[in-house]
Image (cartoon, helix red, strand yellow):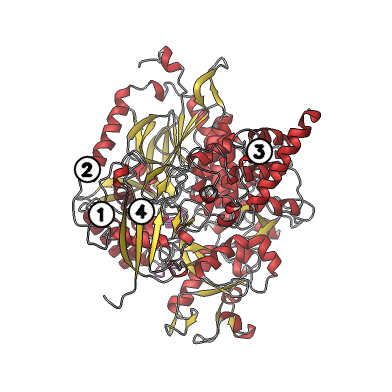
Amino acid sequence: MSTTRTVRLKILRQDSPSKPQTKRWEEFEVPWLPQMNVISALMEIQRSPKTTDGKTVAPVVWESSCLEEVCGACTMIVNGRVRQACTAFVDRLGGGETITLEPMTKFPLVRDLVVDRSRMFDDLKQVKAWIDLDGSHELGPGPRQSPANQEEAYPLSRCMTCGCCLEACPQVHESSPFVGPAAINQVRLFNLHPSGKMHATERLESLMGEGGVADCGKAQNCVEVCPKEIPLVDSIAQVSRQVTKHMLFGWLLK
Amino acid sequence: MKTSDKNESRVARRVIVVGGGLAGLTTVMKLCEAGVPVDLFSLVPVKRSHSVCAQGGINASVNTKGEGDSPRIHLEETVYGGDFLANQPPVKGMADAAPGIVFMLDRMGVPFNRTPEGLLDFRRFGGTLFHRTAFAGATTGQQLLYALDEQVRRWETVDVEDSKGAALRGEKMVRKLEHWDFLGIVQDDAGRCVGIVAQDMKTMAIEAFRGDAVCLATGGPGIVFGRSTNSVINTGTAAAAAYRQGALYANGELIQVHPTAIPGADKLRLISESARGEGGRVWVPKDPKDKRKGREIPERERDYFLEAKYPGYGNLVPRDIASRELFAKCFHDKRGVYNPKTEKNENEVYLDLTRIPKETLRKKLAGILEIYEKFVGEDPYENPMRVFPAVHYSMGGLWVDFEKSADGGLVRGSPRNQATNIDGLYAAGEVDYQYHGANRLGANSLLSCIYAGLEAGPAIAAYRKGLAASAHDVPQSVFDKAEKREAERYQKILAMDGDENPYALHKELGEVMLRDCTIERDNAVLGKVIETIGELEDRAKNVGVPDTGDHANHGAQFVRHLSNMLVLARVIAEGALARDESRGAHYKPAFKQRDDERWLRTTLALYERGEGARSSVKFVRQLDATIAGKSVTITDAVDTTLVTPRARKYETAGAASAAATGASSADKQPST
């Protein structure tokens, strides 16, 4: 066994939100595999859920779905950095022998590495992140759009609602109503679309009050951690300008 | 039967949709537009459904490139690509509806790639010579899923109204129940589906819900094969549970293996067919011991084997053919890419995009190239990618009905469309068997999911209108009983204290299914596969539940999914054993020919209990059922009234469609 390469994981666990006394670190050691990511390591623990001190425990609970970084499910804190576990490769992580896994801290805990991100989906309701369609019946093609418009919209539209930007944002915390970068970026996206534009003011107004775009502290952490490299700082700046313009001149246009 | 009292009438009388991918969301949207409130259940937040993984695009014969494409040609190529096993009226309905579907998505704000004139751009895909595939970079599924998610979210904010137009307090048109696991349907004494039992995967509470109809839109069963291109949630558990309750499962053996994926310990990641649609070429070195890197091997020393064998369609032959050729090249000829480190020919071939301008790649394929770069650690703009086939899609699934229209398509709004053999239970999306025959063409899956939803929504609304008695008036005892049944089952799982680890058993199942039940099938080997499945079923009764926690207990849930996966594995393997022919994705070297006389028919499987812990499959040729209150005789005959079956020949350009080549053909035009 001594020649077999292994990977050590140190994982912050808790059985449920109502049992804070169960919060603990557990360590596991699993066989190394080529191209191994954190998900494969967690899968190894499932097949043999034993800690390094020999205790058989319940397998670690985490959330995942696509495993190719398009669904956003497996977001967690790996070696102190928020990211998707599926693209966290054991050999490329650096930072020593042991990999540390923790749940995100800006969302309510569910269990182990699972948190409840439903507020992000609720926020999308608040900012009306949709096109106001007359109906899904046949009405012919949509509005023509330039390739340039598509090239601006597409990267914004790749947001997986993974929560990295909220996790990294110092303005997002328990006592703050700040909506965060992800939802603001959606406002930019829909206000860019030829039909979406028609309802731009409703979206802007949803970001004018407390918790709106003005709460951004310009720390720019969001853009650093976004796995899809969405220009979030840009989006916040643009939406911020739209909001200011609407506040100053909106009444004139009514 | 008790009629609703005053109090109950202020409660929305909902239908239930299980699954929030493209098919489920489309069904929900159509139901809401028809004024029907919905409970939408999903194992994961709907934005994380497996539709998000679809990359290349969605087919629609919009014909903006002046090529003379038409829905008729789309129909013909889909049917031909599926080796004539699909019922043709639903395929016609889908091909006819496709341009309207893409326009609808465009109106919803999907950032489809554009032409210089501002129109939708289209690219080529497998099994056709036309530019028919609309796309949003190489993450089209994600973009379509998000657009439908947004529309459904809008319905989450709309009040339910009573017959007088007054809002029902606190009731919105869509109520989403995310992180809920489907356990089974609830049937009344007559067998009609009147609701579901599901489990909250946070609190582990098991609860029965009333629904005037239930639509399963729960996707495919790729995880039965261990690793595949599928998301980890695609265990097929919901389909298996319904099958165990009497739903008919059709063509289970027809599993699509995609030719180009990248191997991984946790997953086999797809590299979209659009890579070849945009000009990517598949090759192996002519010298099987060539030690050089792919990019260093000169043109004349490369064997472009697909182009050589299939000059008509080249790298864009349908997936079943491409996968067989890649497999043969690696397994039989030992001509896979040579690895000087292992001194072996690996099971890999090159997929080469390096000759395509980088700007084009960035605009059209960045999503998949990013995946390759991240997971392989190599730059695909500079190096030919190394790929191998992987299990990708199930053509088979729950049997569903259709009502044929005078022009040979479907009657929109017929309560028979997308209806299973259990009255009140519908299925839409990859979970149904309806649109792809024995092999699915690329970029037809996003289309079939949305089209099935467009049919299922109005069908369910019509079914609900025609009901003599609402599920909401069925006695509570029916639901209590179903809830108790599932709660007891779950308690039994929690009490399991055997020696087997369910995740380890699943790994064994996946290894056997992947090795022996995919590209090439052999009856003797399949016999052993079935025996292994039986042994795994025995051992699964002896698992130790890995987790007894009362909150977010994924371990106990997995024990349940494993049991359902074993049931579906048997359907797949026994269907494969029975079908002694080669058709589409189902290939037996001992039976190389397609046998229309004996096997131009649908495999229809019914669940039976086997010996001890084992399940058993009963194959039937016909079955009586009640659908939308009417007696129907289901048969295994395939409706081939629109395109006459003929041999597939992808060596010749245009062979897939007589209408496209203008050749005179025996194909019947629809008689109206």
Mark 3 on the same chain as mark 1: yes
Q: Secondary structure at mark 1?
A: loop
In this view of the protein, which residue sits in the foreground, A62 or B604?
A62
Q: Secondary structure at mark 4?
A: strand
Q: Please give the residue where the numbered disc 2 appears in the rendered image.
A: B492
The subunit letter for the residue under badge 3 reads: A
Question: Is residue B198 placed above or below B269 in the rendered structure?
Answer: above
Labels 3, 4: front one: 4
The subunit letter for the residue under badge 1 reads: A
Q: Please give the residue where the numbered disc 4 appears in the rendered image.
A: A12
Q: Please give the residue where the numbered disc 1 appears in the rendered image.
A: A57
Q: Calculate the distance from the C-alpha at mark 3 to the C-alpha at mark 2.
A: 47 Å
- Give the magenta range: B589-600
Q: Quadrant of residue B132?
A: bottom right
The picture places residue B69, in percent across and down from the top left corner, at 70, 54
In this view of the protein, which residue sits in the foreground, B439 or A17?
A17
- Magenta segment, principal secondary structure? loop
Q: Please give the residue where the numbered disc 3 appears in the rendered image.
A: A131
Mark 4 on the same chain as mark 2: no
Q: Is residue B597 magenta?
A: yes
Q: Is residue A239 magenta?
A: no
